[in-house]
Structures are given as C-alpha cells and as structure tokens.
Image: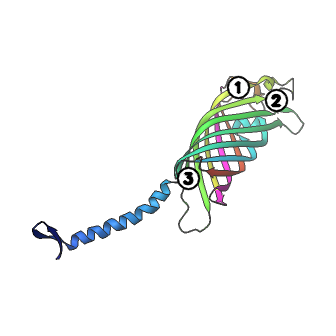
Amino acid sequence: MWRGSCTRTGSSFSVPITPNATKYGVLLAILAVMAVPSAGLGQSTGKVSLEARGGLVFPVSDLGKVNDLGGSAGGSVLWNFHPNWALRFDVDYMGLDDGTDGSGTVFSPPMDLLYYGGAVEVNFNAPRYQDFPLKFMASLGLGSMSMKVDETYDFDHPANGFDHTYLAMQLGAKAGWQVTPWINIFLNSSLYMIFLDDFDTLVWVDGEVLTESFDLGWVIPLTLGARLTFLPW
C-alpha cells in the first residue's frame, strides 16, 4: 500500500492510495484519450451540401408505353445533422420524349415532369477492408410531381391538354467517389412513384398500345453529379 502525507496545523495524517485507485486513474485517462476522436466526429455535423446532377430518365410500366426516354437535371440542398444522416430538399426536371410507333403514329406528345420534395438520406460508412474513397448513400422522400404535356407538339392528340400535379414518392441510391473532403462525384439512380388519377390517364387509352387507364406512373432517372459540402459558418 502506498501512502501520501498531508500536514495540518500541529498534526499530520496519511491518505492511503490503493492499487485499485491507480487502475481507475489509468482507465479514466484512456477514456479521455478515446473521447478525442469522438469529439472530432461530432464536429462533422451541421455541414451543408449543395448537389447538381444530370442524365437520362426512363419511363417504365404503363407510362413507358406512351412516352420514350428523355433527359433529366436536378439539384439538392442538404443539412447534415449527423455524420450518417441528412435532411434534403430536391428539385428535379425530367423531359420525356414523345411516344410513337414504327409508322410514326403519336401515342403521346412530349411531357415535362417537375418534382419538388423533401427526403431523409443515410450515408453508409465505407467497408473497412477497402482503401478506396467510396461513399454509398440512400434516400427516401415525398413530394409533388407536376406533369404537363407539350401542347404545341400535336394539337389533335387527346392528351394535348394534360396538365396535373400529383403526390410522388422518391427512392434513391448513390455511389460516390470522395475526390476531396469537400467534393464528391457520384452516380445516382432514383425511382419515382407517381400517384395518378386513373380518370386523367384515359386520354392515353387507344385500345392497342394502352387498353385501360392507370393510376401509378413510374420514372427512373439515371444521373451523374457532384456534391459540394461545407460549413456554413
């Protein structure tokens, strides 16, 4: 047993310092050192990200029967409230090409889609066994999808006046390359599920290409993009 001494007025006494007390002190020191990386990790919260992307959009299912693939462009603003989680606001434009058959018959004029919505994004930690600066992200969101047919394309088509806004759900996934701590280049794929009114889609029913109306529309953008992340203060 180790002893320390302390002198009071006219007297002295010893304070025992046991081996267990020494062990506890070492343990507390180790925990203090381990807490330093955790504090550094916590500083990654509060960052803001800006994202821009562009590529192709593929209409599928019934919507793919009446329109052809087109182009897509979009952007996002993200708030990283946790190292692995973010809240985001998305804007995406998708222009579907007209749908025609081999003889040139128009099933549907070109259509413009504009999506506004919010989402929650999760950023997955990179696998420990690989040294590449890869980032993997997934998101789930909800918003509104404006769908408007180009009325100047075919004045005689029954879908010429189609102009509606619907609720839409978004499911996305990204694989990105972290070029620098602030810049990420990524490949993005999203699935938009649009909750249509089947009465509105009667304008596409022709008995051949489309035999009945539908109440779900699906589009899949495949885009390349870049993300810039920074501290706003």
Q: Of the two numbered discs 1 and 3 on the same chain, state the one appearing first in sequence.
A: 3
What amino acid type is highlighted by mark number 2? Asp
Query: Is residue 180 positioned above or below 116 on the image?
Result: below
User: Whole-percent x and y of residue 39?
Assistant: 45, 57
- Badge number at residue 150: 2
What amino acid type is highlighted by mark number 3? Asn
What's the distance in space between the residues labelled 2 and 3, CA to CA?
38 Å
Total number of numbered discs in the rendering? 3
Q: Of the two numbered discs 2 and 1 on the same chain, state the one appearing first in sequence.
A: 2
User: Whole-percent x and y of residue 201?
Assistant: 71, 26
User: Whole-percent x and y of residue 51?
Assistant: 67, 47
Residue lying furthest right in this view?
Answer: 103
Q: Residues within 10 Å of mark 2 (few under 14, many from 20)?
A: many
Query: Is residue 199 positioned above or below 179 on the image?
Result: above
Q: Residues within 10 Å of mark 1 (few under 14, many from 20)?
A: some
Q: Residue at x 22, y 70 (%)?
A: 20
Q: Which residue is mark 1?
A: 164
Which portion, as a residue range, is magenta? 176-197
